Structures are given as structure tokens and as C-alpha cells.
Amino acid sequence: MRKPIYNLSLILLVFALSGVLGGKDASAQLLNFAQEGMPEEPGLALLQEEPHDIIYFTEKSGGGWCKAHLLDFPGRKPPSSPSGSVKFQVLGVEGKDLTCKWSDIERIDLWEVRLEREAKERIAKADFVGAYPFLSVLIRDFPNRPGLRKLRSEFIWKDAISRAKKQEWASTLAMLEELKAYDPSFERSKVIKAMSGVIDRLMKGLVEDGKLDLARQLLTRIESDYPNEKIDAVKKWNDTFMAMAKAKQDQAIAAFKEKDYRSARRFIRESAYVEPNLEGNTQLLRQIQNTYPLVNVGVLQSATVFEPTRIDNWAARRAGRLLYRTVFEIQGAGPEGGEYSFIFGDTEMNPNRMQFDLMLTPQELKPPLDQIQGYYLADVMARRAQKNSSEYFSPWAAAVETIALDGPQQISFNLRRPHVLPICLLQIPVDGSWFGGEPGSPTGDYRTDLVEDDYKLVRYVLSGKPKTENQPREIVENRLDSGAEGVGQLLRGELDVLDQLFPADAVRLRKSRNVKVVNYPLPTVHMLVPCSDHPYLAERTFRRALVYGINREDILKGELLEGLDFEGCRVLSGPFPAGIELNDPLGYAYDRNIKPRNYEPPLAKLLLAMNKNQMESMAQRKKEEVPELTPIRLAFPSDNMSRVACEAIRSQWELIGLEVELVELPVGRTFPNSDEDIADIVYVSAAVWEPVIDARRVLGPEGLAKSNDQLVGLGLRRIEEAKNWREVRDGLISLHAISHHELPIIPLWQMVDSYAYRRDLIGMGSDIVSLYQNADNWRIGN
């Protein structure tokens, strides 16, 4: 049986009689059909509607229009000479097939035609943001529509022109390259000419900003991506770079003739960076390096003191190793604590760990270490155990019972009880006074020669004769304002080494074939250490509030790691390193069962209120005034990483109602002096590499925290009295729990730091714990 044929009037009547338009839904349904007028233009809201065609009826049939589900035409093309009838469903009236005569239809506005019309109108008005959604739906749903390829090309072309007028050169080039890739034949000559102009402007801006590395990368990429295109800007800037490189080469030659080897080296490096293939550069660089080898090191922190065993000062530790040696030097982490070398010879430990010997081998040492005398070294060890001596070190005094000189070159030590690692107690700096020189004079291969501009530049020169012709005569430290600055200088050859990298910078440098990036094997432990008599910081409840008020995970991963995943970097629950891998021996002091406290601002506020009540109750009992909660002065070293972390901590503490003042410490300082009142708590990056001894250096009464807590003291003594590694580990795990509960310091996170160097610097070694650990073996390669 044939279905009846309706005009719109009858359609509406059928819907009304059948109840389809009943009640409150009638007005909503009428949005999809009407007996007169035109449908509203929805604009961008059209994309939120279900795809549909609009059928317009003739006046003779009753007029009006309706929105219908997409009509089933072959290839979505209405017949050119239609006859008979057409079947459709009105949008919103599901399950009711309707039929009308073709002669009753005035026209049909197809869905894709409407999308195209909306896109074209917006493109004509330069509303590319508004046009894009319509165009993207067309591309997705009607990819084979005639004229769509041209429409998309025109959209990209006109969008690029619009961006160029706003001088948005980078995005303009991106649009032009997208157009070139999508439709190579579209306005080919105009597109190439436009690309050339935009590239020229980008290159000019990068060169003027000193970003030669990015300019060179851009030029190289364009040459590689478009080898068959004649882009005028490419030739222009290749010629420009060649001229710049030649000028730098001429400057290098002139400086070399004047024996200004530092300037000559800088100029030739800059020349090679601008144009790597300039003839004569390689030979001249080799000649300069052979005549006067030197190494430029970029640092984030300058050293103003030189202490190779300093636990809280990265720069003092780094530069101290360059100038001074220590009796025992840590080389890395082993299966049972750190691995140490005895700089004067060999060591021998008795199996029962009650006795060990030091054997001096001066005949195998170089000056001045070859002048060591057994009796002098024995006296140093003895003074270290005498309470009335300025060199007194209580853990050593508690460990050693007798010191004997068995001949001029052997010293024997008897211990009070078995000690797992007694040599770690003998990391004693060695200065020139040990060999008849001035107190404080260097014993390393280098000495300080020049300090400029508040330690912005520090030059160290070789103390004695070079071992080889290409051993560096100078090591020059240049303090950087940011890690990004150092990356650029390293890539340009202005620096040979970067001492410490932001993780994102390390990722960038790993892509360079001329640079090697290496992780230090031992991580640093970052913490906040109270350093004043602030009455509130003395309260454990207040310190707990501070912990709960810091989103440590967010600061570490978002601010410091910049969203990157770095193995070994993690939030900590105590003052000891957790190791880099699971079951890492380095983490022997860390209890992984103790989880770091979460970020809980409401709990932090509650603890602050509790602490306030406790302070008020205590003051009432003592009949004293309640101490004022003065602003917390948060100090940090003068480096960018510490600054970023402390700015984030301040913001989060302010959210829980605390007033916080940031205090940047002077260059080279990492901790306030005991006689100055400038801070209440300080951000510390500590090298806690040997917890069995460093526990006291961090938590003890003479350590960073200056803790007099009885539980902490008991934990420290238990470790120092341990007779084997099991007792050591048990004691450290217990001390971890005590620290987690008492909070003598506020643990933050563990960082795995890295360094980078140019590959023509030879002899860096592997698994070095300090940058200058092998500096005496550095060589400038050819």
C-alpha cells in the first residue's frame, strides 16, 4: 500500500492530532519546522545541532520549511530533474516517515552546503577562528566534496596573510608550510615568495636576539625540507652567516697573534658555531688549543669558600675539590656504603673491623702530596680525637681507641668497637700547611688566579707544570643567570662544561651531537632547615602544618622537572636519600614504608589553629605574653632552581594564611651565619651521600638542624655505636621514623642532578660525584 503524500499544512495537522506537538514540547518541536518564515541562523551553534537538511516548500503547497534528517541522495546530490515524490523524516519527530511531491519543494538547503557557506562567510570577514570549526567538520564528514581542497587552501593562505599583518612570523611560517605540504600547486610562486619573506624576518629577529643556535637550526631545516625550492632568504642568510663567521675568524687570528689566547679561542668557537664548515677554522682552533688549552665552565652557583666536604654548599664542594684534596675522597656508592680512595696510599681493614692500617706510598705520588710524613698524619688523626682540640670530631673520638705509628709510612688504628666504615670519618681537607706551606694554600692541581664582578667570573690556573701539552692551563668558571643561558653558550662553544642542569635543559642538550649529558650518580636531598629562634618554628605542630601546606609533588614535577619524568627524582619523607632505583644500596638509610605526607591545606590550617591555642595556653600557664607570629623569613641560595622552588613554597604557605618573606642569600652562601638574624628557615640542597656519618651533620646539635631533641640524639648515638651494617641500617631506619615524627628538618624531595660537556673535552671520566673529581686528567682533544 502506497504511503500518503503530505504538504506542510497536513504534516502539522497530523502531528497535532497525534499528540506529537502536545504540551510544553510544542514550541521546542516547532523549531524544526514552520508553516511560514525562515529558520533562524544559529551561527556557531549550528555545529551543536544534529546534521540535517532544510526543505523549503512552495507557496502553492502551503509554504513553510522543515529540518529533515540527511536525505539519501546518491553522492549527496539532489536529482537535476526530479519527479515523483521524496521520503524524509523531520528532525525531532523520530520514527515517522513522511513523503511529499518534488513539485511541492521549492529548494533543499543541504547540510554540507550550509557548513561551506558559514565557513566562506567567516573567511571573507577574516574570522579564521570562527571558520575553522565549520571547515574541520567538512573535512571530517565530507572529505571528497568538490571544491573543499581549494576552500581549505584559501583558508590557510588567507589566515597566513592575516597573521603576517600582525607580525606573528612564527605562526605565519607554520601556516605557509602547512599549505605547502597540503597543496603544493596552490599559488606556488606566491607561497614561496611569502615563505622567503617570513623566514628572513624570523632569521633577523633571532640573530638580533643572539639566538644564533635557533637561527642556524631554522635555516638548516628549511634547506633540508625544501631542497628543490629557490627560497631567496636561505641564500641570503647562508651568505650572511659565512660573512659573520669569516669576521670572527679574522678576529681570532688577530687575537692569536697578540697572544690573547682567551679571546682567540672565544672568537674561533663563535666562528665555528655560526658556520661549521668554514675553511681554516678546525686548524686554527687546534693551534690555539695546543698553544694554551683552557676550559670554560658554566655554573649556577659561584664558590666563595672552598670546602670539598661541605654538605650543604654545592659550589664550595665543587670548587673545593679543584683546589684541595681530602685524606679520604668519596668516589661513589658501593654495596656497603660509599667507596673511598686514600690519597696518600693504600688501606687495609682487619676482618673483625676492630683495626685498620694506612700505608703511605709517597714514591707514587706527585707534588705536594709526595711530601707527606707518617708522623704528621698520625698527629692530625690524634688531634681529631682530642676534645680540647679545634679539630675535634666527636664521631671519630667515639670510634678510635689507639693510634700507632708502625714505621715512617704505616699508621695503625685500634677501634673501641667494630665500625662498618671508619674511613668515612677521615674526610679531612689537606692544605699546604701539611707540607710546610701557608695554611689554606691549595694542594690540588689548580689555584685561584682572578675573581671578577662579585664572583661572576673566577679563573683557576694550573699550579705546577702540565702533565701533557693539552692539559688545561686554566679553568674559568662563569656564573650564569639561568640554565637556558648556559645551554645556548655551551652549544655555541662559549662554554665547554655546564656544572648543573635543569632537567628540561638536559633533554634539549641530549639532542646535540657535540655535547654529552651525564647524570651524577649520587642524588641531592632538598629540605627546609629551621635556623632561628622563631618561637613558632620551634613547635612540632607548627612544622607539621608547614609540611601539609606544601604541594611538594606539584612543585617537583611541575616547576623543577617541568612535567618531565626523571628517574630518581621524588618527594621524600625523611632526611636521607631514597636511592635512584628500587633496592638501590644508596638508599640504605631510607624507609620506603614511611610515605611522604600529602598536600592537605585544610589540615594545615587546623594544625596552625591548634598550635595557636597551644601557644596561648602555655603563655597563660607561664603568665607571659603570647609570642607574636611574625612573618616566616624563607632564605635560599642565589641560584635559579632554589629561587623557583621557594617562590612556589611561599605562594602555598600564603594560601594557608601565613605571611612569608623571601631572603636571597649572598653569592656563594647557602646558610645564614650563626651571628646574623636574617632568616627563620632556609632551603638546603644537601649531599647526604653517607648517612652513617651525614646523619649527625644534618640533624646533630652541631649540624644543619642543630637539633637538641632527645629522640634524635638517641638515634644518632645508636648509629655510631652500631657494630655491623644490619645495626647501622636498623638505626638509620629508626632515625628516619623519628625525623618523620619530630620534623627537625622539613623534607622536600630528592633530585638527580646532571652535567654536560662538549665532546672535545677528554678525561671527564664516568660516575663522578663532583665535577672536578678527574680535573687533573682533563685534556683538550683535537
Image (cartoon, rainbow, N blue to C red):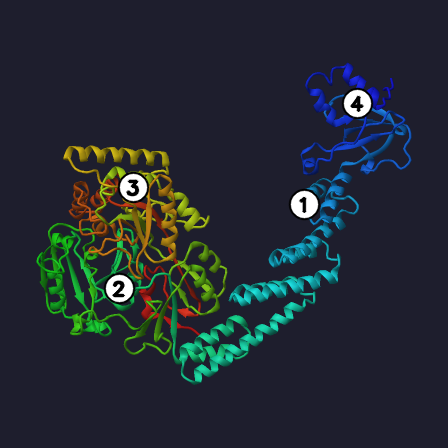
Q: Classify residue 287 as left or right of residue 603.
A: right
Q: Is residue 376 above or below residue 162?
A: below
Task: Look at the image and tell me whether residue 175 can be seen.
Answer: yes
Pointer 1 and pointer 2: residues touching (CB < 8 Å)?
no
**Residue that badge 1 annotates:** 132
User: Disc 1 vs disc 2: which is toward the camera?
Assistant: 1
Using the rendered view, name the quadrant where residue 424 is placed: bottom left
Q: Amino acid at mark 1?
A: Tyr
Q: Amino acid at mark 3?
A: Asp
Distance from disc 4 to disc 3, alpha carbons, whole Å, reads 72 Å
Image quarter hosting the N terminus: top right
User: Disc 3 vs disc 2: which is toward the camera?
Assistant: 2
Q: Amino acid at mark 2?
A: Val
> Which mark is first along the chain, 2 or 1?
1
Using the rendered view, name the quadrant where residue 383 is placed: bottom left
Quick one: label 3, few (<14), some, or many (20+) residues within 10 Å? Answer: many
Q: Depth check: 736 or 459 in front?
A: 459
Residue 305 tag number: 2
Distance from disc 3 to disc 2, alpha carbons, whole Å, reads 34 Å
Q: Is residue 572 above or below residue 259?
A: above
User: Disc 2 vs disc 4: which is toward the camera?
Assistant: 2
